[in-house]
Image (cartoon, coloured by chain):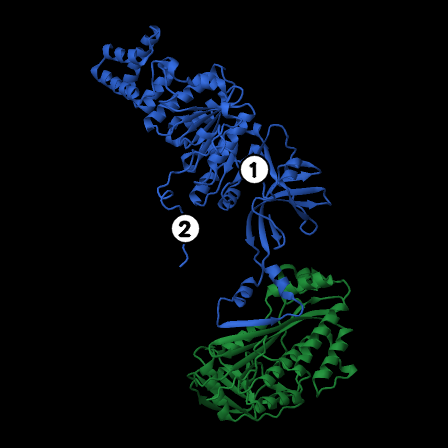
Amino acid sequence: MQIISFPNEEVGKGDYLTVEDFKTGKSLIVQVVDIQYANIPGIFEELLRNYDGDSSLQGEDIDPFEVATHIAYIQDARLLVCKIRATNINGDMVFTSSWLPSRSRAVIRKLPIERLFASAKNGNEYLIDLGETNEKKQFQVDVRALDGGLNIITGKKGTGKSHIAKLLTLSLVTHGAPVVILDINGEYTGLGRTADGKPNDLHEKIHILTPKKNFKLNLGEFKIRVMLNILVNALHLPGTSAREFGRIWRFLDQNNALNMRELGEAIKNWKCNQHVRDALFSRYYTLLNSGLFTDEPAKVASFEDSIHKTRVGGAVVINLRDTSTVDRHVLVEYVLGKLVDLLTAKKLRAIFLFAEEAHLYLRETYWDDIVTRMRHYGMFTTFVTNQPETIRENIYRQADNLFLFNFTNDHDLETVSRASKVDADTVKSVARDLPPHHCLVLGKIVNDFPIVTKVRKLDVQTMGHTRLFFSKIHPLSNPVRSM
Amino acid sequence: MNAQYPITTTPKYNFPLPEENLQLPLDFIEISMRSLKHMKPVKLTQENSTSFHQNPKKQTTLNPTTGLTKLKPDPTKIPIVAMDVSSIRLGETEQGILIALRGAIVWKQDTRYRYLRLGPFPFHITNKTQLEISSLFRQHQQTIRIQRHTIPNILYLQTRLTTLLERWIQSSVNHTTRRSLILWDGSLTAGTPETPTLDMAQLLEEARIRKNTILAFSKMTRLLFNGRRLTNLLLDHEPPCIMRIEDNTVYEGPMHLMGNIYVAKLTRGSLAFRMDIDKQVPHLHVVESVQKLLGNDVVLQSYPETLRLAHIFSTFTAIEVLGIQRCLFKEKNLKILAKPNVRRILFGPFGKGFEG
């Protein structure tokens, strides 16, 4: 639907309008997805004639009726390209667009977001303050919409993805939900502190696990399946050797001797092919030298214990910063395996997992696992990435909520527009013009009404700053110097 | 050399408008305003196709002889002034028609162009307002006396108002310039109700007194010479050149050609134009003037740039029509409705002709 707008009418991309047809008692709810200049007849001639860049042609007008102001008004008319989102039939919202209002009688009004949500009969429990709308009004969403869902936060670098991930994490924690964060850059380690470094209200609920420091693995916590996954997927152990490892593991388990020292001894003394032994030793030493394993679990925090602390609301941040690719894979295999075990054993009701740049540590087979099997166990994942093509298409198609920040690259926009929660035109047009910290929220959390919001500020310690070389020598004040 | 600037400057424009000559636009504005005041809040019927008014012209066959003169551009500095007026019909009301007029003057001095646009002046021409408009004619056209029984009809008043504004602008420019080339759009034909012979004669005389030369370019002419269109006579000649048409035709009725007719082909290309120049200007002076025009103005497709700009600045674009209609709607509560297209209604997709 295309609507003409004049210069005195303030309408922005993402705004909602109602097109009311009083005679039928219906109104269309449409969203502005693009704003163009209206193609008014004669505009090209008018602009050519009034072009004032040519200093050799100047002049004046005697315009007693001041028609020029009216001409300028029409010249600046805009065309609002709108998408029909719903039809309001006597107060009931119907998500179809099979009806069109009268062109001549319909009255077009701006629809404030709070009224849109009121008319969509959105609940007001479990509300979290996400930010503000274009009308500078508070924008709240129901945090329960994240429950049982698959979420994607994406946008180009520096637009505010991690910020909204932190906001959602803290909101979930505030409402008593357990959260696990795979923190690739150590950005979430300051969640429990205010911007000036003081402990905040949620300080006790944020548990930072830094591998090799306060987070080490003990073979006794492992199930054979998880360890085999690590050996096969992260350390590329061949099948024959994996089968032999299984026998060794069961032997040690039966003798209650599952620790690194006994494992090394067992491989050394096990009757098997020398090549198999060599392969097993090679992986064993990789694990041993990673520093991730300990035979003294009492000295370090147990992942399971940390997870138990979040049962009434809390977040476990796995700080993957400064870990090698192999170590990351080992840790993620362990964490995911452990979570599935806890969920399967119903020791954990559900868990919200935030995975930043997941392609750096998530193996191929996990993508399908996360959207199908793990989801049913109660693991609700939120992917955070600035490289949308690293997330598989089926993830986009099954995503329940999408938090989309600015993208200018057509290829990125094309990838993101595969999300089934919204039409490609909206994604491509609105996301391209989103300012930093403005987010297009799509999906269940906004009742399938795409909303543009400026994400609110958080008083937490930001740890995601890039360390700069020049900042200490000559801080950059103005990158452009006038000549 | 004492380079006397031919245009007296004022603080506002580079074009002074003498008091006596300002009378007409003030009258124009007053009548325009009054004509719109008479309007009750009515619905305006919009024209389906707005078109510029054109005087119906009869095809005339001349009985002339010709003389070709080759030209050489003369760069001797001379100011060039061009003017044009446009009118457009905005729509119809129950009481009459609504039109808008606008004039434009363009000066060429050295390498710079300056323009002054006058208007738009919207007019609501009704039976009531046409008396006032006719009175305006009597006031400003000294030779014609319109009798009550000869009051022109509403549609014809558009032409008359356009001509009136055009003559005023021509007169103003005439009074305020000296030793300049003045370019008009149209011919030097007089004797019509809009252009009485005496008025035209006075304009030409004033130009001669002030050492101005008026060159009137007609974009279209229906004059024929030996069965050929006049402007086709120079097709095979190398430009720049002009051909003088010695016209010995005796015209019946009030119409008079006040100028000598030339065909001017000033640049390469397929176009040539009819150019009228005051009969009392010697041929040699005509040649010098056109050569100065070639030496001082940009001429494309045989048409001077200054006159082209005057036409462009006076012409109404579609967006301006919308702007005026909006102005009338906002200021005078005039709502515009599309006029039903009778041809369309009767003939459906075959009704493609002009909606009269």
Judge by depth and name the residue closer to the eye, A239 or A332. A332
In the picture shown, does residue A332 fall above or below A136? above
Mark 1 to mark 2: distance in Å?
Answer: 30 Å
Judge by depth and name the residue closer to the eye, A180 or A146. A180
Q: Point out the image quarter for the C terminus of chain B.
A: bottom right
Helix, strand or loop at disc 2? loop
Judge by depth and name the residue closer to the eye, B181 or A159. A159
In the picture shown, does residue B56 fall above or below A264? below
Q: Chain of mark 1?
A: A
Give the mark, 1 or 2, whose residue is nearer the N terminus. 1
Amino acid carrying mark 2 in the image: Pro
Q: Badge 1: how crowded within 10 Å, few (<14), some, or many (20+)?
A: many
Residue at the disc numbered 2 = A479
Amino acid carrying mark 1 in the image: Gly
Q: Which colour represents chain A?
A: blue
- Is A19 positioned to the left or the right of A415 in the image? right
Residue at the disc numbered 1 = A131
Q: Residue furthest top?
A: A255
Q: How many marks?
A: 2
Q: Chain of mark 2?
A: A
Q: Position of residue A237 (x, y in %)?
A: 29, 21
- Residue B31 visible to an observer of this rendering: yes
Chain that the image shows in green: B
